[in-house]
Amino acid sequence: MSIVKIPIIDNEGRVLGSDCLVEYEGEVCPYVTIDSEIGKRLVGYEIIKRDLEDCLFILESIKNGVTNEQVLINALWESFITKYGRCFSDANRGAMY
């Protein structure tokens, strides 16, 4: 499985953004674009879920002694605090409403 980044181009050839498609065994997986309030909430909750999964991985890495370098341990803690705090910020919740 791989993710393919596809540019979104207007009629004049300008790149407006990009879309990501998932490929599995050489075929693009079918998908449906959801552009509704409940869809936006789902995306917001999915972002929070991923951030919390990352937080769990960071804490497990620190607990298991992934490194003895204090500067790297401090960087992991800062990353944890940032990701965890982002779950409760208005910017993240704004994607849900």
Image (cartoon, grey):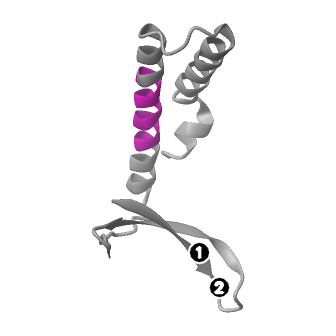
Is residue 12 depicted above or below 55 in this figure?
Answer: below
Residue stretch in magenta: 45-56
- Quarter residue 8 falls in: bottom right
Name the residue carrying label 1: 7
Q: Give the main secondary structure of the magenta stretch.
A: helix
Q: Secondary structure at mark 1?
A: strand
Image quadrant of residue 14? bottom right
- Residue at 59%, 29% (x, y): give it: 89
Say whether residue 49 is magenta: yes
Asked if residue 33 is positioned above or below residue 70 in the image, the reply reads below
Q: Which residue is mark 2?
A: 10
Q: Number of numbered discs present? A: 2
Residue 95, x across and y down, in percent:
53, 47
Examine the structure image and report whether residue 48 is included in the region drawn in magenta.
yes
Disc 2 residue crowd, few under 14, some 14–19, many 20+, Cα 10 Å: few
State the SS at label 2: loop
Residue placed most toward the observer, 52 or 5: 5
Local crowd size for mark 1, using a 10 Å CA cut-off: few (<14), some (14–19), many (≥20)? few
Q: Which residue corresponds to the image point at 43% horizontal and 49% vertical from the top-left? A: 43
The image shows residue 40 at horizontal and vertical percentages of: 45, 53
In three-dimensional space, the C-alpha distance between marks 1 and 2, rounded to whole angstroms, equals 10 Å
Amino acid type at circle 1 is Pro
Residue drawn at x 43%, y 37% as measured from the top left: 50
Q: Is residue 82 left or right of residue 1?
A: right
Q: Quadrant of residue 36?
A: bottom left
Percent position of residue 21, x then y: 42, 67
Residue visible at 38% across and 53% down in the picture? 38
The amino acid type, in three-letter code, at marker 2 is Asp
Q: Nearer the viewer, mark 1 or mark 2?
A: 1
